[in-house]
């Protein structure tokens, strides 16, 4: 993973200030008051370490259970001894992430540790074979000072407030839920203090039952860590018994407490201790989205009907369910518009309001002014398919449709000053047709792509949603309305409101439109994304055809040539 710090104080002549390299994979980053904290993860590989027991042929040849058990136990002891010998010979340099930097004299390696290893933390509960690293860079300092902190963990969800960064890692070994104590699914919570812009300080770790959905299932408020989890034995056949009733959901509150044992705790560190819990929420369903706003938590769970739950966290030691609302479909992301209104995006309902219609994106507006009785103010179904000509003798043909904003909140753009929501939508269909001219049959086929950014007016005061207009990137991917297969993403990946304009970016193009009437200002092709090659041929009677690899000459218009037709490229 490489970080490049660029000095842009002179906009006409940006300069590379630092080039840093760290072993591991980039996860995410947070910027608070000019300090950037980047999170990476390095899975630790130690050559020769075995995570399995080697069994000799005598084990498989033996018919005696007693003898096989004896061989198994002996092989297990030999494996443990061999692994222990490798571990005993390890140094920190063998498995800790290495950091390099390009300097005036070339590439050099930063020290693994400052000397007392205070950059490293290890949770007693974690079974993860790797390090999560937080690199802290003061972007606004003269020399962009850097600090690193490591904690043993698996890949984690990351949340940050103004003063706290929270990592939530599955409390399992490298392969799914094996080796969990008691076979329960659980999550380890690691908390770091980021209130000082010059450093990141490990605070404590703890554990809660269940697993978290995403970063929005985590929160910090007035020093209290709040976590929403789902406990679910799905797919773990050894747990799915008659007593198992399906998934259930929780909200936990935790605080860091100093070591209270007279003889001292391991490392004399603090521990994240659970102080409050509300459980058995929506039994038989699982969390699809969560959001903590002030003293409230909002959860959306789903199985057939989508319930919105309102939970009071005013007293963190005694969380309480205030209200519940059941509506069709499901919300996958919750966005607070104001203290009394939630804006959500998700999947539309299936037939009769049950299940999900995965081809339909749905935006909803909830009124939570009375938390004991939340209501659905309005909902707006969205589809990128063309309704007026969606079906013909070959069928409707729209193979799927979706919005990246249903699973990536960065694609969900809400502009509060204008109460405008921008949501990307995309789909494609395979097209095929035949025409007969002068007794000869001509066929053409290809793909038609739809890539749009739907703008929606959000009237929180009156509780309504309405269509504002559309930014269309489809022409970047279709040539004369038809294209060969486009191998990459056609979605509008990101959008941003800037003054009176909205900027939209997809893989093949960028555009600027005026927000009030969506008049196009600029449309640019992005280099490096050429149109897929399209072939033309004619198919005559008796199944005779010309060479399909022959394309029309430059300037020829296949629509004006009666002896040509389009086929899939």
Image: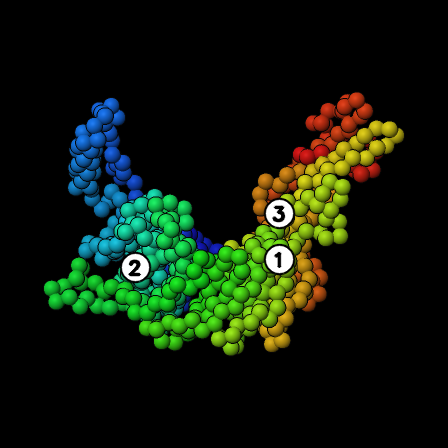
Near mark 1 (Cα within 10 A), the count class, few <14, some 14-19 or many ≥20, is: few
Comparing labels 1 and 3, the label whose residue is closer to the camera: 1
> For numbered disc 3, what is the local secondary structure?
strand
In the foreground, 147 or 301: 301
Q: Residue at x 64, y 39 (%)?
A: 485
Q: Residue at x 18, y 40 (%)?
A: 84
Marks 1,3: beta carbons within 8 A: no
Whole-angstrom CA distance, mark 3 to mark 2, is 40 Å
Residue 200 rendering spot, x and y as whole percentages: 31, 62
Q: Residue furthest front?
A: 242
Q: Residue furthest right?
A: 438
Residue 185 has which mark? Answer: none
Comparing labels 2 and 1, the label whose residue is closer to the camera: 1
Left/right of residue 561 with respect to residue 103 in the rendered view: right
| Residue hosting label 3 | 400
Q: Is residue 190 above or below residue 24?
A: below
Marks 3,2: beta carbons within 8 A: no
In the foreground, 444 or 277: 277
Position of the C terminus, as image quadrant, is top right
Residue 16 rendering spot, x and y as whole percentages: 43, 53
> For numbered disc 1, what is the local secondary structure?
helix
| Residue hosting label 1 | 352
Residue 207 has which mark? Answer: 2
């Amino acid at each position: 993973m490489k970080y490049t710090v660029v000095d842009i104080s002179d906009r006409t002549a940006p300069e590379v200030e630092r080039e840093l390299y760290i072993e591991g994979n980039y996860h995410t980053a947070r910027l608070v008051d000019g300090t950037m904290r980047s999170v990476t993860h390095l899975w630790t590989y130690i050559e020769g370490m075995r995570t399995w027991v080697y069994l000799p042929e005598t084990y498989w040849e033996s018919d005696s259970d007693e003898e096989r058990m004896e061989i198994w136990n002996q092989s297990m002891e030999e494996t443990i001894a061999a692994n222990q010998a490798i571990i005993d010979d390890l140094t920190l340099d063998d498995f800790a992430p290495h950091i390099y930097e390009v300097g005036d004299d070339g590439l050099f390696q930063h020290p693994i540790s400052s000397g007392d290893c205070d950059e490293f933390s290890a949770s007693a509960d974690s079974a993860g074979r790797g390090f999560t690293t937080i690199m802290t860079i003061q972007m606004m300092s003269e020399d962009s000072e850097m600090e690193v902190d490591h904690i043993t963990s698996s890949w984690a969800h990351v949340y940050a407030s103004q003063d706290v960064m929270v990592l939530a890692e599955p409390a399992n070994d490298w392969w799914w839920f094996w080796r969990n104590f008691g076979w329960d699914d659980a999550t380890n919570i690691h908390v770091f203090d980021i209130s000082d812009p010059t450093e990141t300080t490990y605070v404590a770790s703890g554990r809660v039952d269940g697993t978290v959905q995403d970063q929005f299932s985590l929160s910090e408020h007035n020093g209290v860590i709040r976590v929403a989890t789902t406990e679910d034995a799905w797919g773990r056949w050894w747990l799915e018994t008659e007593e198992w009733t399906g998934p259930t959901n929780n909200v936990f509150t935790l605080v860091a407490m100093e070591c209270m044992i007279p003889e001292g705790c391991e490392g004399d560190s603090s521990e994240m201790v659970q102080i409050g819990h509300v459980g058995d929420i929506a039994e038989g369903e699982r969390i699809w989205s969560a959001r903590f706003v002030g003293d409230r938590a909002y959860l959306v769970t789903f199985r057939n009907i989508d319930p919105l739950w309102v939970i009071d966290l005013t007293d963190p030691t005694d969380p309480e369910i205030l209200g519940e609302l059941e509506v069709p479909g499901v919300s996958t992301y919750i966005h607070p518009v104001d203290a009394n209104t939630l804006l959500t995006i998700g999947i539309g309902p299936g037939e009769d309001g049950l299940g999900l219609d995965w081809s339909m994106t749905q935006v909803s507006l909830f009124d939570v002014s009375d938390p004991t009785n939340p209501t659905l103010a309005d909902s707006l179904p969205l589809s990128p398919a063309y309704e007026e000509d969606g079906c013909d003798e070959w069928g409707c043909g729209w193979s799927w449709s979706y919005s990246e904003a249903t699973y990536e909140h960065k694609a969900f753009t809400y502009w509060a000053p204008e109460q405008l929501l921008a949501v990307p939508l995309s789909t494609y269909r395979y097209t095929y047709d035949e025409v007969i001219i002068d007794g000869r049959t001509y066929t053409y086929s290809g793909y038609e792509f739809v890539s749009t950014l739907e703008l929606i007016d959000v009237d929180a005061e009156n509780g309504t949603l309405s269509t504002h207009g559309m930014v269309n990137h489809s022409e970047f991917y279709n040539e004369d309305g038809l294209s060969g297969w486009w191998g990459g993403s056609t979605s509008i990946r990101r959008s941003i409101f800037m003054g009176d304009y909205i900027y939209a970016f997809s893989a093949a193009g960028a555009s600027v439109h005026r927000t009030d009437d969506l008049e196009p200002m600029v449309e640019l092709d992005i280099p490096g994304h050429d149109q897929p090659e399209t072939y033309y041929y004619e198919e005559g009677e008796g199944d005779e055809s010309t060479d399909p690899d022959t394309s029309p000459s430059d300037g020829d218009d296949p629509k004006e040539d009666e002896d040509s037709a389009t086929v899939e490229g």
